[in-house]
Every structure is written in structure tokens, then in C-alpha cells.
Image (cartoon, grey):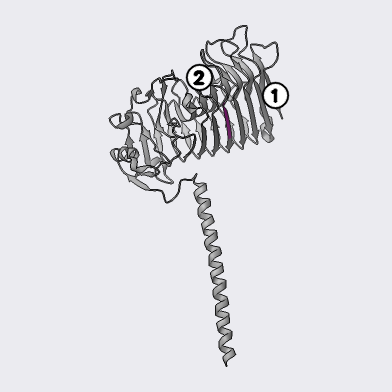
């Protein structure tokens, strides 16, 4: 009889140990999943403080309140008309690790309209060591980790403005930004991912742009859907970008990568299944561009695209500095203004297309590529040792290419274009 009692007790104890062991394993896996989720959300944790706003006054109060560092600002459906009567000229400057989120699944329900902001709100005046008057963005990001998701950002296309989203807050040496599920339209530049001026030297910008629709950005001087750049005397800076599922259409230039008036900077980018169509120019690559006082030298751009479509780009002509209209324009070194010749040197482009459809774009060639080009040619070429290398894989091999080593001709032959199929 005693053995019959001990045996069930043994079974119960064994089952309890097994259950506790399984529960620990479940908890461990759940903890791992939570860590993965946090990482997948670009480090913006689900437990971050949430601040809910439903009108323009509440939005400005929330975004400028120092107690909201690290918070997620969540906007109720409606149209938010920005006004210069609020702090910072009416611009929306995200604080450290702050995010701005509309209505998931419905970016059209939350509209931020910048039409009412004057030029004065955007003007960035010269400062010691930075003798440039430049333009800030409507939504200014770049402070730690920032995100903008699930909303519409717009401007009246007839109203002067610069960028609707711009990484021009230089507050940390490395910044991570995410822009996703947004509709961005009606500006000179839709999204500007940049390092600029001397205070950005050595800075790293890591950006993720996913499932955005960016259209009707046609205002001069740029008219770019997405612009990725290092510019204006910045030195030793990096931009790293991942693009996925974006739809860029109706812009002067759909997507542009530029190192302008700067030295020793690099851009690396990956495009996965983006649609770039019905722009004046699909994609522009400018390895180094010089001005009268600032050379473009020793810069690089590395780009890989997988399954991205570059179709039917034949709309409003792109600005002169971005080269020829059509599918793809690439120049490792370029001079696009009346500047001293021979100042654009040692710039490199490495461009790879894997299974990308590049077709039905305006012009005799789908891709136009230069080692170096001067748009104001003299007897002297733009510079020396500028190299463009383009790799075409799969269906991308069908794209026709016009390759020019140097214009004007460089007798030494150090500028080059290499095409690999």
C-alpha cells in the first residue's frame, strides 16, 4: 500500500519538474522574441512613453516638451496646418530618440501640411567655419534614433520650400532614422538624408526607408523624391541607407545619391523592390561635385539594387546638376557650374543591379555613365582618377548603356567607365 502512494507522488514531482523546465524555456524564448522585436523596431522600444495629440497646438507642445525625450508622439486623424507662430519657426524638430507616428494602416488619415510656413522658417544662416546659407527641413530628424511613420507630409507645389523630412539635426555622432509608410509630396526634396557642413564631419547616418510613396516633388533647385548626400565641406562622413518597397513617381528625379562640395565621404545603399517610374530621371549618382570654393574629391558611392523597377522615366526634366533625363545617370566626377576645372578628383562609383528591370525610359540609352563630366566644358576636363563601375546581372543585362570615360576628353586617360554584364 505504501508503494502505491509513493509512485503517484513520484509521477507528480516529475511532471512538475518537467512543467517548470518547459515554462522556463517558453519564458526564455518569449524574452528572445521581445529582444528581436525591439531590434526590428530600430531600437524604438514598445514601452517608450506615448503622447497622444489631436490638434496642432497639442502637437507643437508635445514635440517641444523636454519631458518627452524618447517619447512616441501619436497623432489622431486630421490635418495639422503648420504655422510660423509656434516655436522654431513652426518646424517639427524631433528630440533625442523621439518618434512621430500617425494611424497604422492609413497614412492618408493624418496630414501634416507645411504650405503656411515662410522661407524664413527654413533659413539656416552662416556660422563660424560654415559660410553657407542653407535650408532646414519641415520635419527635422537626426537626434539619436528618430522615426516618422504612417502619415502624409505635404506642401502646395507652388509654394517655395525645401525638404519635407531632413536629417539636419546634428546632435549625435551616429544617428539611426526610420521613415516608413508615409506619403510625401509637393516639395523641392521629399526626403533628404544628409550630412552637411563641418559639424557633420565624421558623422554616421543609418537610414531605413520602407513602403513610402513619394511624389510630385518638382520645385527647383532639386525636385528630388529621395536625396542621399554628403555636402558643403563635410569631411569623413558616412550615410548608410536601406530602401525597400518605396514608390517614387512624378518627381524631377526619383532617387539621387550625391557627394557635393566635400571630401573623403562615402555612401552605401541597398534598394530592394523599389518602384521608380514616371520621373524626369529615375536615379542619379554623383560621386563628387565641385563648386568654386569647395572641391569634390576622394568620395565614394556603393549601391546595390535587387528587383527594383526603373521604368518610364520621361517626365519633367531634372535639374542640370543631375545630368541627363532617362533611367539612370551616373558620373563619378562632375562639374555642374562655372568653377575652376580639374578640381573633381579620385571619386569612385560602384553600382550593381540584380534582376532589375530598366526599360522604357526616355533617350537612346537606359543608362548614361561618365567617369568624369564637365557641364561647362573648357579645354580642361573636370578632374582625374574618377571611376564608374556598373555591374548588370540577370534581366538587368538588357539595359543599354552609353559609357563615356571623360567629357571633355582627358588625354591621360585616368577617368574611366567599366561595364560588367
Q: Element under label 2?
A: loop
Q: Which of 86/9 is in front?
A: 9
Relative image position of residue 325 (x, y in whole percent): 56, 21
Earlier in the chain: of badge 1 and badge 2, it is 2
User: Any mark on residue 418, and which?
Assistant: 1
Residue 31 visible, this angle: yes
Dominant SS type (magenta): strand
Say which residue appears at 51% left-offset and 52% top-offset: 35
Q: Residue furthest top?
A: 379
| Circle 1 SS class | strand
Q: Which residues are the magenta region?
A: 265-269
Q: Residues within 10 Å of mark 2 (few under 14, many from 20)?
A: many
Residue 1 location, quadrant: bottom right
Q: Residue at x 49, y 46 (%)?
A: 41
Q: Nearer the viewer, mark 1 or mark 2?
A: 1
Quadrant in which the C terminus is drawn = top right
Lateral position of residue 99 relative to residue 287, left or right: left
When the figure is inspected, residue 366 is found, relative to residue 177, above or below; the finding is above
State the CA–CA distance, disc 1 to disc 2.
26 Å
Query: Compared with residue 47, is residue 402 higher up or lower down, i.e. above or below?
Result: above
Pointers 1 and 2 in contact (C-beta within 8 Å)? no
Mark 1 nearby-residue class (10 Å; few <14, some 14–19, many ≥20): some
Image coordinates for residue 402, horizontal then vertical, percent: 66, 21
Q: Which mark is residue 232?
A: none
Query: Looking at the picture, how far across and down is residue 129, in whole percent?
Result: 45, 20
Q: Is residue 39 above or below residue 407?
A: below
Label disc, if present, on residue 319 of the rendered structure: 2
Residue 114: x %, y % from top left: 36, 30
Task: Residue 216: tell me if it is visible.
Answer: no
Residue 70 belongs to magenta span: no
Amino acid at each position: 500500500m505504501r508503494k502505491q502512494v509513493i509512485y503517484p507522488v513520484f509521477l507528480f514531482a516529475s511532471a512538475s519538474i518537467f512543467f517548470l523546465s518547459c515554462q522556463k524555456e517558453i519564458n526564455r524564448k518569449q524574452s528572445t522574441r521581445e529582444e528581436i522585436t525591439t531590434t526590428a523596431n530600430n531600437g524604438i522600444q514598445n514601452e517608450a512613453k506615448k503622447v497622444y495629440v489631436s490638434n496642432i497646438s497639442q502637437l507643437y507642445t508635445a514635440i517641444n516638451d523636454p519631458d518627452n525625450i524618447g517619447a512616441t508622439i501619436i497623432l489622431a486623424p486630421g490635418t495639422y496646418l503648420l504655422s510660423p507662430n509656434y516655436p522654431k519657426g513652426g518646424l517639427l524638430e524631433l528630440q533625442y530618440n523621439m518618434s512621430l507616428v500617425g494611424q497604422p494602416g492609413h497614412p492618408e488619415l493624418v496630414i501634416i501640411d507645411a504650405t503656411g510656413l515662410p522661407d524664413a522658417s527654413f533659413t539656416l544662416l552662416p556660422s563660424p567655419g560654415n559660410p553657407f546659407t542653407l535650408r532646414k527641413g519641415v520635419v527635422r530628424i537626426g537626434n539619436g534614433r528618430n522615426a516618422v511613420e504612417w502619415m502624409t507630409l505635404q506642401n502646395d507645389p507652388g509654394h517655395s520650400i525645401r525638404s519635407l523630412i531632413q536629417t539636419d539635426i546634428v546632435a549625435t555622432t551616429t544617428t539611426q532614422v526610420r521613415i516608413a509608410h508615409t506619403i510625401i509630396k509637393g516639395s523641392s526634396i521629399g526626403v533628404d538624408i544628409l550630412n552637411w557642413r563641418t559639424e557633420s564631419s565624421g558623422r554616421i547616418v543609418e537610414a531605413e526607408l520602407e513602403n513610402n510613396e513619394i511624389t510630385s516633388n518638382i520645385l527647383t533647385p532639386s525636385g528630388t523624391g529621395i536625396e542621399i548626400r554628403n555636402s558643403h565641406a563635410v569631411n569623413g562622413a558616412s550615410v548608410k541607407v536601406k530602401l525597400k518597397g518605396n514608390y517614387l513617381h512624378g518627381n524631377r528625379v526619383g532617387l539621387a545619391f550625391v557627394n557635393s562640395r566635400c571630401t573623403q565621404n562615402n555612401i552605401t545603399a541597398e534598394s530592394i523592390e523599389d518602384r521608380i517610374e514616371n520621373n524626369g530621371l529615375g536615379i542619379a549618382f554623383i560621386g563628387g561635385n565641385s563648386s568654386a570654393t569647395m572641391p569634390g574629391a576622394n568620395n565614394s558611392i556603393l549601391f546595390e539594387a535587387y528587383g527594383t523597377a526603373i521604368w518610364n522615366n520621361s517626365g519633367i526634366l531634372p535639374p542640370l546638376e543631375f545630368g541627363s533625363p532617362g533611367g539612370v545617370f551616373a558620373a563619378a566626377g562632375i562639374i555642374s557650374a562655372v568653377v575652376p576645372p580639374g578640381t573633381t578628383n579620385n571619386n569612385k562609383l560602384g553600382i550593381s543591379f540584380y534582376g532589375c528591370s530598366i526599360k522604357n525610359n526616355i533617350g537612346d540609352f537606359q543608362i548614361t555613365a561618365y567617369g568624369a563630366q564637365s557641364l561647362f566644358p573648357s579645354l580642361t576636363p573636370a578632374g582625374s582618377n574618377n571611376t564608374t563601375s556598373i555591374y548588370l546581372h540577370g534581366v538587368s543585362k538588357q539595359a543599354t548603356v552609353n559609357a563615356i570615360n571623360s567629357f571633355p576628353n582627358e588625354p591621360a586617360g585616368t577617368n574611366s567607365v567599366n561595364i560588367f554584364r
